[in-house]
Amino acid sequence: MKLEQITALLVFIIISFSTVFAQDKDSTAVEPDTLRRNALKIFLDCASCDEDYIRQQLEYINYVRDRREAQIHIMVTSQSTGSGGREYTFHFLGQKEFKGMNDTLVYVGEIDDTREMVRNGQLKTLKLGLARYVARTPLAEYLNIEYNPPEKEKEVVEDKWKSWVFDLRVSGFLNGQKSRSSYYYSGSMIARKVTPEWKYYFKGRYNITEDKISTGADVIYSSLNSKSFSGLVVKSISDHWSAGGRIRASQSSFSNYKFRYSVYPGLEYDIFPYSESTRKQLRILYTVGFSFNNYQDSTIYEKTEEYLIGHSLDISFEMTQKWGSVETSLNWSNYFFDWSKNNLSFDTYLNIRVAKGLRFNVGGYLSLIHDQLNLVKGGATTEEILLYRKELETNYSFFTSFGITYTFGSIYNNVVNPRFGSGGGGRTFYY
């Protein structure tokens, strides 16, 4: 039986089952009204929220799919906290009869919080923020506000870690078949401390990858390893200025570094206040410093080691608005001894709501590379090229992606139905 015949048969069976179940229903039965009369229409713009859970728990709201139909546009942004958790900022933006009634609430999830704890915290924040709007609708008489005082006031305790947080991580994988096997493992440690005045971030990492490939006549072994340590120290000067610096030490067989270290202090200015960072940033960062490179093999410039002095300029822009979001950055760097040895890179990501139901996203980066001082003089072997075990000469690199989504139909989506998995199709089976 052909694939088309099997597909047609499955569709026929599904339609037959639907017809039988429909006929079994009482002819006088009607579908329940899934819309709440006089309820607020909200557009929930939150990539990190469990929207199905929110719809189930927050039942006195109408959820619409088009932001232009909403009375309240709820935009949720997030950023990492110093302890490794996440700070969620809920922006309640009034529209139509609520235009001008805006509010902002913040919920902080700790690093040890489970998914259940986070989504309950988000739900509580939504309820608090929506209360003032619901109070202006006929549904207000059915809304109860309760206060549950804690059994015991929290005692103020001294932080024995002095705001320092540490992460230890080990990961790896092993896979293989008759003619090929490979393994990878990685270990890292992170120490960080974030206060309003200072930011410290230190990270050490070790990676190794090994492949064994049998061609029948020969067996090819290939390995790639790297070690690195990096540090960042930043001092807050004002709501727009900060000063700091980065240090780095590393070893990489891929990039021909037996040992490398660099020190780059810098100064940053944000056009917008840092307090508005969840919605918009325009940061300009200038750094200048030096590095020492000790190479595994002689480079194409006949060097086994060298000191280099250079500088870089980074301009980063991020914005999250009702129409979508944009993240873009531009970086320029070069060495002082020869300004032709430079690197210019640009990356961006756009997520835009073009019109009702139409969304467009595009992203990528482009680098113009003229500073590969570390390339091995003898080049790479065929195996190293095929397995990408050595950095190869190039004057550019790029990556891009894009997508268009168009959704039409009912603008309301209050109902949650988890049968046969999430979404409309559940699991996809292939025959």
Image (tube, helix red, strand yellow):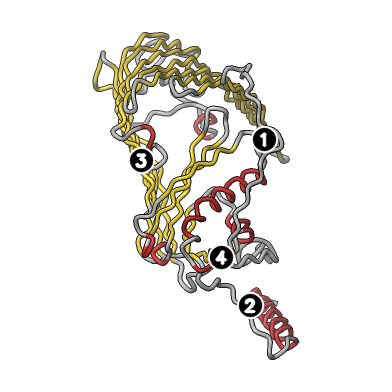
Q: CA distance from mark 2 to mark 1?
A: 64 Å
Tell me, for residue 214, which label it has, or none: 1
Relative side of 210 to 39, left or right = right
Q: CA distance from mark 1 to mark 3?
A: 53 Å
**Extreme-bottom residue of the structure:** 27
Q: Which residue is mark 2?
A: 32
Q: Tell me which label, 1 or 3, sits earlier in the chain.
A: 1
Viewer-side label of 2, 1: 2
Q: Secondary structure at mark 2?
A: loop
Position in image of residue 341 (x %, y %): 29, 22
Q: Residue at x 40, y 13 (%)?
A: 263
Q: CA distance from mark 4 to mark 3?
A: 38 Å
Q: Residue at x 66, y 63 (%)?
A: 426
Relative height, residue 152 to residue 323 (above, below): above
Position in image of residue 118 (x %, y %): 62, 44
Amino acid marked by disc 1: Ser
Amino acid marked by disc 4: Glu
